[in-house]
């Protein structure tokens, strides 16, 4: 249940790349000649969201978990954060590493970035996984959880304390007492204490989760018609307890996805890759291998 014990016997490294002047952090492992897989965390997250998944994925893929623009230990410039800027940074990262085609597995915000990347760069996208994140309108029952998330984010970015960080992480989990470890709190606490990082997190959160409360924003960035434009294979991986979008509402989006598969996990909330690691890995690898 520790990041260190997950990685202790693995050939995994933390690397920093210059991506258009942005110092960009990635955790990476696996054979660089294998198919590339990039994990993308959610809003306010960081690469450690997928540390439990490296062991199973490294034998099959060049496996990377990216700190997206403004997140983790990637630079957080004083800018207006938009989907396009996060996508442009991801594209520049893929180009810098010389990756021809990539599979993207995104959780929450990362899922939406993966989907928009696939729409903009279909020739560079092998497959995508949308993990508890979806391009679609929201119903009132879904917005309740998003409003709760925004309130927790206001607290953690207003005054960075370990209690506030723990509360924010608890929103992600079905069983916070078990899943929100002291180590995970320390990792995120130290990230948020960096200069300007809490402010960057606030801007990104109110751009993404805050945008979901705005019907006009949803029409631009989170709509069913964009799902029709995705041409690569798509796995939509959900949970029964996802606080941001109920599974029965997420399933409605499958009518708009040409080449998609929908699976619901039952013992996790917003981080199934963390709370149901073994099952997540089996489903995930089977899908990606079948999409090669």
Image (tube, rainbow, N blue to C red):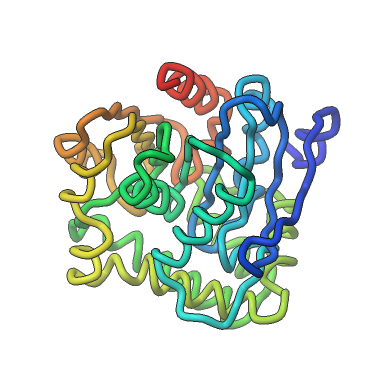
Q: Position of residue 271 (x, y in %)?
A: 50, 43
Viewer-nearest residue: 39 or 198: 39
- Residue 133 in sight here: no
The image quarter in which residue 127 lies: top left
**Residue 232, placed above or below residue 23:** above
**Residue 152, placed above or below residue 221:** below
The image quarter in which residue 31 lies: top right
Q: Position of residue 89 (x, y in %)?
A: 53, 60
Q: Residue at x 55, y 35 (%)?
A: 37
Q: Residue at x 54, y 56 (%)?
A: 92
Q: Residue at x 27, y 51 (%)?
A: 135
How many labels were placed on the picture? 0
Apparent side of residue 283 relative to residue 278 in the rendered image (left or right): left
Quadrant of the image containing the C terminus: top left
Viewer-nearest residue: 250 or 58: 58
Apparent side of residue 79 relative to residue 61 in the rendered image (left or right): left
Quadrant of the image containing the N terminus: top right
Apparent side of residue 81 relative to residue 75 in the rendered image (left or right): left
Apparent side of residue 173 relative to residue 82 in the rendered image (left or right): right
- Residue 14 in sight here: yes
Q: Position of residue 61 (x, y in %)?
A: 61, 26
Residue at the limit of the structure toward the right, as seen here? 9
Q: Residue at x 46, y 22 (%)?
A: 283
Viewer-nearest residue: 100 or 136: 100
Q: Position of residue 29 (x, y in %)?
A: 72, 34
């Amino acid at each position: 249940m520790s990041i260190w014990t997950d990685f202790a016997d693995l050939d995994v490294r933390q690397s920093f790349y210059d991506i258009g002047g942005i110092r960009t952090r990635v955790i990476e492992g696996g054979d660089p000649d294998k198919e590339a897989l990039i994990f993308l965390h959610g809003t306010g997250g960081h690469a450690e969201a997928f540390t439990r998944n490296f062991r199973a994925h490294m034998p099959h893929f060049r496996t990377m978990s990216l700190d997206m623009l403004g997140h983790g230990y990637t630079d957080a410039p004083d800018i207006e954060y938009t989907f396009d800027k996060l996508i442009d940074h991801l594209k520049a990262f893929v180009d810098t590493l010389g990756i021809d085609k990539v599979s993207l597995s995104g959780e929450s915000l990362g899922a939406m970035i993966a989907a928009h990347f696939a729409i903009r760069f279909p020739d560079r996208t092998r497959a995508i996984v949308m993990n508890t994140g979806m391009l679609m309108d929201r119903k009132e029952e879904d917005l309740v959880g998003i409003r709760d998330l925004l309130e927790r984010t206001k607290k953690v970015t207003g005054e960075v304390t370990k209690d506030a960080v723990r509360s924010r992480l608890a929103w992600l989990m079905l069983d916070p007492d078990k899943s929100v470890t002291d180590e995970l709190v320390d990792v995120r606490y130290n990230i948020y204490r960096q200069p300007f990082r809490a402010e960057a997190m606030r801007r990104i959160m109110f751009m993404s989760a805050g945008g979901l409360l705005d019907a006009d924003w949803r029409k631009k960035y989170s709509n069913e018609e964009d799902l029709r434009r995705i041409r690569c294979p798509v796995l939509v991986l959900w949970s029964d307890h996802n606080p941001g979008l109920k599974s029965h509402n997420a399933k409605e989006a499958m009518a708009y996805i040409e080449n998609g598969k929908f699976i619901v996990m039952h013992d996790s909330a917003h981080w199934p890759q963390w709370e149901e690691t073994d099952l997540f890995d089996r489903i995930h690898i089977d899908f990606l291998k079948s999409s090669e």
